[in-house]
């Protein structure tokens, strides 16, 4: 096993006790064995740390936001490659194996997209599941999560001043430096546990993150994708590109459109608030 490249999986957490164990079990159940698991908590008040210590000795505390947690986790790792996931995600059993194979076969790859599918409870979770299904294979809506450690360090990791859009920022900076072909993808899926979505809380989160868009927008590498990510026209065009899928269940399809309209409205209000604060 020591001759195999080591893969470090970094999991930032915050009050993640409800779903963390499923995440960590999925990491420990990988078909690839030379894996290092690192959990970086942000002052959780539940049993997150206790659950994490059942699966790894490398449990740390760091804040104030997710980008800082991720970077700290990588700094404490010694893998040849790093994979950064959220604590509400579950890995397909061959994800790490597929990543190692891709990186080994093509040394020019600087990042790998791992497609996601959602699951959860309730009506809005079903709407989110449908929404995410439209993003698979869409370059401006998917973001790389796996990187060679050297590339991650050379790019200074995630921008710790960037909150909410850091997933897009790092791989887009990599693509700007090395070319779009530097970002590849695998076919194994991450399952994203949306739990029981509350539409008001979802909009509140969009409002919060949109107030911090200025840093993301200021990076030229992000401009091309941002104009698509933040423009409702492109999103609705994507949904209506496959009307049979969108309206296979009309209630879910209409719910998706209502949810995205509410999220875009909340995000727009949050961004306008940040602009007013600077004027």
Image: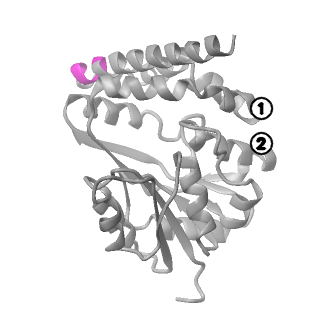
Q: Which sits in the foreground, 16 or 121? A: 16
Give the residue furthest to the right. Answer: 177
Question: Dot 2: few (<14), some (14–19), or many (≥20) neighbours within 10 Å?
Answer: some
Residue at (46% x, 76% y) in the render: 32
Q: Where is residue 44 drawn, in percent x and y?
A: 36, 53
State the image coordinates of residue 31 (x, y, percent, origin top left): 41, 75
Residue 35, position as x, y percentages in the image: 49, 75
- Per the rendering, the mark at residue 176 is 2
Residue that mark 1 sits on = 220
**Is residue 20 rendered to the left or right of residue 98?**
left
Task: Please name whichever residue, 91 or 239, is drawn nearer the observer in this view of the structure.
Answer: 91
Quarter-wise, where is residue 274 in the image?
Answer: top right
Residues drawn in magenta: 250-254
**How many numbered discs?**
2
Residue 29 shows up from this direction: no
Q: Residues within 10 Å of mark 1 (few under 14, many from 20)?
A: few
Q: Contact, CB < 8 Å: mark 1 with mark 2?
A: yes
The span from disc 1 to disc 2 (Cα, nearest Å) is 9 Å
> Residue 65, percent across and down?
53, 45
Among the two numbered marks 1 and 2 on one chain, the one whose residue lies closer to the N terminus:
2
* 65 magenta-colored: no
State the residue at coordinates (70%, 33%): 222
Query: Residue 77's quadrant in the figure?
Result: bottom right
User: Please, is residue 149 above or below residue 175 in the view?
Assistant: below
Q: Nearer the viewer, mark 1 or mark 2?
A: 1
Task: Check the image and report above or below for 264 versus 155.
Answer: above
Left or right: 96 in relation to 88? right
Q: Is residue 177 left or right of residue 129?
A: right
- The quadrant the C terminus occupies is top right
Up the image or down, 255 lies above or below 176; here it is above
């Amino acid at each position: 096993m020591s001759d195999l490249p080591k893969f470090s999986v970094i999991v930032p957490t915050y009050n993640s006790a409800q779903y963390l164990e499923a995440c960590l079990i999925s990491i420990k159940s990988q078909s690839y064995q030379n894996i290092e698991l690192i959990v970086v908590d942000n002052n959780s008040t539940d049993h997150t740390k206790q659950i994490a210590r059942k699966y790894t000795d490398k449990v740390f505390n760091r804040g104030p936001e997710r980008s800082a947690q991720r970077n700290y986790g990588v700094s404490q790792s010694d893998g040849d490659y790093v994979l950064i996931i959220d604590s509400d995600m579950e890995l397909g059993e061959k994800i790490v194996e597929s990543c190692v194979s891709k990186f080994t076969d093509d040394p020019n790859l600087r990042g790998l997209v791992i497609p996601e599918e959602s699951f959860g409870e309730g009506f809005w979770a079903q709407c989110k599941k449908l929404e995410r299904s439209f993003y698979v294979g869409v370059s401006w809506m998917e973001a790389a999560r796996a990187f060679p450690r050297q590339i991650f360090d050379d790019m200074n990791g995630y921008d710790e001043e960037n909150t909410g859009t850091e997933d897009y920022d790092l791989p887009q900076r990599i693509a700007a430096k090395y070319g779009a072909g530097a970002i590849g993808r695998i076919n194994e899926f991450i399952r994203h546990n949306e739990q029981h979505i509350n539409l008001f809380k979802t909009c509140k989160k969009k409002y919060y993150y949109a107030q911090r868009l200025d840093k993301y927008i200021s990076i030229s590498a992000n401009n091309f994708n941002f104009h698509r990510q933040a423009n409702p026209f492109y999103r609705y065009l994507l949904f209506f590109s496959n009307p049979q899928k969108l309206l296979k269940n009309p209630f879910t399809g209409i719910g998706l459109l209502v949810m995205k309209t509410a999220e875009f409205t909340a995000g727009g209000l949050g961004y306008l608030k940040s602009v007013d604060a600077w004027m």
